[in-house]
């Protein structure tokens, strides 16, 4: 976990003690290290220096405005998957020419907004979407820059819910349809063909799936070139895995070297879409133990965070390290860390060797990606606060939601004019 360390037996984010942070901002709370995000971004930039890529951060991993602003200031572009994410990145000053729009279900108003903003490219995921974007662009008397997201049917060897490059996936167009669809795209008045795109999955820890996908895509790029369809860029997606527990470090330099060799004399701008790689290990979820309880076979620590705050363990069987905020020596008990939600799936960690009691603070490591961005208000629970730490300074970048926030968009039934029940006539 970059950015997190023990100083005098107290867990710190950079130089800020987490127990002091809990007193100031409360729990549960997501805490992010500014230096860790910067370091991860610079690692990718340095590894792919030879390609001078456009690094488009995948906003869905963590969409907090302060996080986006920091990455924007570092020079990042953005990979978005909704109109809401488009508004977010424009709000922090993103250069529209560094924005790519992915996702299988782009809606009319989202497409119109992206065209108005003059984004770099739409990553098109079906023939129907291609025709829809073309029609909107024609109506607006403009041209939509597109690439096709091609599904190379490569197994990324990751969790099935985050495997996106297999032929049974909802994502992308099949390889055997790509040539026809590129030819069709070139014939459409509202379309300008710009590139090609892949994204085979997330939390990939091995190099082989990438190499397989690259070989297939470069073969397709050459076929397109032979038919007079010359592409400007190749978006190789993201998905580089991070270390949650004992996973090996992703061989990012080896991927860059392999890409450089396979590029040969091809003149293509390279686009990358990292998300998790930049923010996962830059964040923790800080939570406090409410109660401990012991059944015949196991011990539970009930904390104030829950599956609505961090869904990954329940959804993916994800394992994230649990760190005591006050360092321990020789812990002697194994706990399940569970939340207050009325679901058996409401757990954050299992079989943790750690000594816990009511009031203890623990940090769920590697929570910077797909933590807050996937959180919900299940059980009418307000979402957690978010804090960004830079050195010895901490800034609240999202306040904790209150019950009034949750109810504000709802209507009190007593104030609604109720329609009489429908009458069903007998036959």
Image: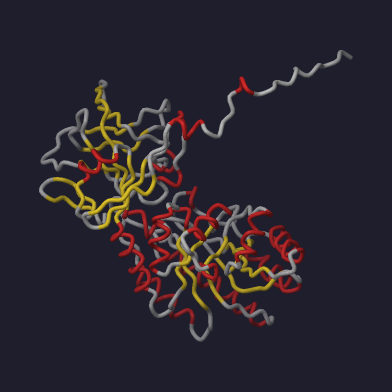
Residue 155 visible, this orientation: no
Residue 300 in which image quadrant: top left
Indicate the colouring scheme.
secondary structure
In the image, residue 414 lies at what x, y percent?
61, 20
**Quadrant where the image shows the C terminus:** top right
- In the picture as drawn, the residue positioned furthest to the right comes out as 427
Please indicate whether residue 211 sits to the left or right of residue 329 in the image: right
- In the picture as drawn, the residue positioned furthest to the bottom comes out as 265
Residue 35 visible, this orientation: yes
Residue at point 43%, 78% (across, down): 52
**Quadrant where the image shows the N terminus:** bottom left
Pick the residue in front: 418 or 19.
418
Please indicate whether residue 169 sits to the left or right of residue 317 in the image: right
In the image, residue 25 lies at what x, y percent?
29, 40
Q: Is residue 19 above or below residue 95?
A: above
Callout count: 0
Residue at point 34%, 74% (across, down): 46
Residue at point 54%, 73% (across, down): 234
In the image, residue 291 lies at what x, y percent?
26, 25
- In the picture as drawn, the residue positioned furthest to the top comes out as 426
Please indicate whether residue 146 sits to the left or right of residue 56 in the image: right
Please indicate whether residue 176 sits to the left or right of residue 368 in the image: right
Residue 329 in which image quadrant: top left
In the image, residue 161 lies at what x, y percent?
49, 48
Pick the residue in front: 80 or 87.
87
Residue 390 in which image quadrant: bottom left
Q: Is residue 237 above or below residue 26?
A: below
């Amino acid at each position: 976990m970059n950015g997190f360390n023990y100083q005098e037996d107290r867990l710190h984010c950079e130089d800020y003690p987490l127990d002091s942070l809990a007193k100031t901002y409360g729990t549960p709370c997501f805490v992010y290290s500014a230096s860790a995000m910067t370091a991860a971004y610079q690692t990718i930039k340095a590894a792919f220096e030879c390609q001078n890529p456009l690094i488009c951060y995948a906003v869905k991993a963590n969409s907090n405005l302060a996080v986006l602003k920091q990455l924007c200031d570092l020079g990042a572009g953005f990979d978005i998957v909704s109109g809401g994410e488009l508004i977010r990145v424009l709000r922090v000053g993103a250069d529209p020419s560094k924005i790519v729009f992915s996702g299988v279900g782009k809606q009319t108003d989202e497409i119109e907004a992206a065209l108005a903003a003059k984004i770099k490219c739409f990553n098109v995921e079906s023939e129907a979407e291609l025709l829809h974007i073309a029609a909107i662009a024609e109506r607006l008397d403009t041209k939509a820059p597109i690439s096709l997201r091609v599904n190379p049917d490569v197994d990324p060897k990751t969790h099935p819910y985050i495997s996106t490059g297999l032929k049974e996936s909802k994502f992308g167009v099949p390889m055997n349809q790509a040539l026809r669809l590129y030819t069709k795209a070139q014939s459409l008045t509202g379309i300008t063909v710009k590139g090609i795109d892949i994204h085979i999955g997330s939390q990939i820890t091995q190099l082989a799936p990438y190499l397989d996908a690259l070989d297939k895509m470069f073969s397709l790029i050459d076929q397109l070139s032979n038919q007079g369809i010359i592409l400007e860029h190749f978006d190789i997606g993201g998905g580089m895995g991070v270390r949650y527990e004992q996973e090996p470090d992703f061989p990012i330099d080896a991927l860059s070297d392999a890409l450089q060799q396979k590029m040969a004399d091809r003149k293509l701008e390279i686009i990358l879409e990292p998300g998790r790689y930049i923010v996962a290990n830059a964040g923790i979820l800080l939570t406090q133990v409410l109660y401990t309880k012991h059944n015949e076979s196991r011990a539970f620590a009930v904390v104030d965070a829950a599956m609505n705050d961090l869904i990954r363990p329940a959804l993916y069987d994800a394992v994230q390290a649990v760190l005591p905020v006050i360092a321990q020596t020789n812990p002697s008990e194994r706990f399940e860390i569970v939340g207050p939600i009325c679901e058996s799936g409401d757990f954050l960690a299992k079989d943790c060797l750690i000594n816990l009691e009511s009031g203890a603070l623990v940090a769920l490591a590697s929570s910077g990606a797909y933590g807050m961005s996937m959180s919900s208000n299940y059980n009418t629970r307000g979402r957690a606060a978010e804090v960004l730490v830079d050195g010895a300074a901490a800034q609240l970048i999202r306040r904790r939601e209150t019950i009034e926030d949750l109810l504000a968009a709802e209507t009190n039934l007593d104030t609604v004019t109720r329609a009489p029940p429908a009458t069903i006539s007998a036959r």
